Structure formats: structure tokens, C-alpha cells
Amino acid sequence: MWWNDLQAMAGALALLQPDLDPRADISPRATMRGAVHVGAGSRICDGAHIQGPVSIGRDCLIGNHVLLRGPLCIGDDTRIGFCSELKHAVVGRRVSIGPQCFIGDSRIDDDAYLGALVRTSNHRLDGASIDVHVDGQVINSQRDKLGAWIGAGAALGVGVIILPGRIIAPGSQFGPRITVERNLPAGRYRLLQHLHSQPLE
């Protein structure tokens, strides 16, 4: 199951050694704790805080005041915007994550696009373990924290919220402010908006 990828990643990073490639551009105003790997050509901007174990690939951009909490693996050519927070996640290559996003206990596949303020919810309010719907079956993940699996090439607009354990199908597009409450087939989704004008007083 896809959440096992998170456990496998955490196991692999348990042996990570600190390794900052000399060809990386790391701001002196960024802070790093624990085991952190940064690949060649990657840029770590002012105010970023990285708490290992975290592996960052080549040619990535980690924006101002981004918070990265391991275990976390970020693929090559990925960009993470201002003030986003990522923890316990596997992020693929060429992923674009906009400003002020939260990604927790999740998997994001290659070429996904997340607009500003996208949130993955990663626990239930009642504290129960999270059920995941896979191929028509309901599977108890046995986890009290689990975010989302965002498929390759998916695009999420500003302010999309994904409830725990949901799957975004590869190539799907979700317009702004949608709350993803259940798994949906690949497609394009948008909210209908009804505006009512009122006279100015």
C-alpha cells in the first residue's frame, strides 16, 4: 500500500549522513539540524529551517522560511515556496509546491503542481486510525496520521484541502478552494459559485 512507501523512506533515511554539495547555494541565514543531504545546484533560501533526516535532490529550490521536518525525501528539480511546511513525506521530481502549503505524512509523485495554501489533513478529529479506499475496498491503515497520495502530473489550485487518506488520481485538476472528501476518478473539477449582488447602502 502507498503509505508503506513512507515507512520505507524513513527506514532508508535512518542511515543518512550529512552531505551538503559544495555546488549548492545555501543561505547563511538558513538553519539545518541533524542529517541533511543537499544536492548540487539546489538553493536553500533565507530563513529556511531543515530538521533531518532530510534528503534534497539536485537543482531544487527551498524558498524563504520553508520548514522541512524529517524523515523527508525531495526529488530533483522540485520547488517549494515561501513559508510552506513539509514533514514525513516522499516528494517526487519536478514537483512545484506553492507558498504556505502544508504537506504531512504524504506521497507526491513526479510533475505534480500545488498552488498556494494547499493543505493535506493528516489526522482525524476523533483520533481514530485512518481508513483508505483502494480498488473498492476499505483498508485500515493502522496509522493515526496519514495524509494523501497525489498522483503524477496532478494540479491543485489555490486553497485545495485534502482529507486524510485520500488519493488524487494522476493528471487530475482541482480548481481553487475544493475540499477533497473522497477519492475521485481522474478528471477536471471545479466549484460552482453563485454570487448575489446587493445594492450599496
Image (cartoon, grey):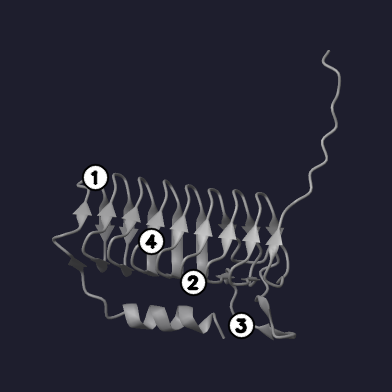
The answer to which of 51 and 96 lies nearer the viewer is 96
Mark 4 burial class by Cα count in 10 Å: few <14, some 14-19, many 20+: many
In the drawing, what numbered circle is on residue 142?
3
Residue at numbered disc 1: 29
Residue at numbered disc 4: 78
Q: Nearer the viewer, mark 1 or mark 2?
A: 2
In the drawing, what numbered circle is on residue 48?
none
Which residue is at 75% across, 51% downward? Answer: 191
Which residue is at 51% across, 59% downward? Answer: 113
Q: Is residue 175 left or right of residue 18?
A: right
Sequence-first disc among 1 and 2: 1
In the drawing, what numbered circle is on residue 109?
2
Count of marks, rendered view: 4
Sequence-first disc among 4 and 1: 1
How far, Cα to Cα, is label 4 from label 3?
30 Å
Q: Amino acid at mark 1?
A: Arg
How far, Cα to Cα, is label 4 from label 2?
11 Å
How far, Cα to Cα, is label 4 from label 1?
21 Å
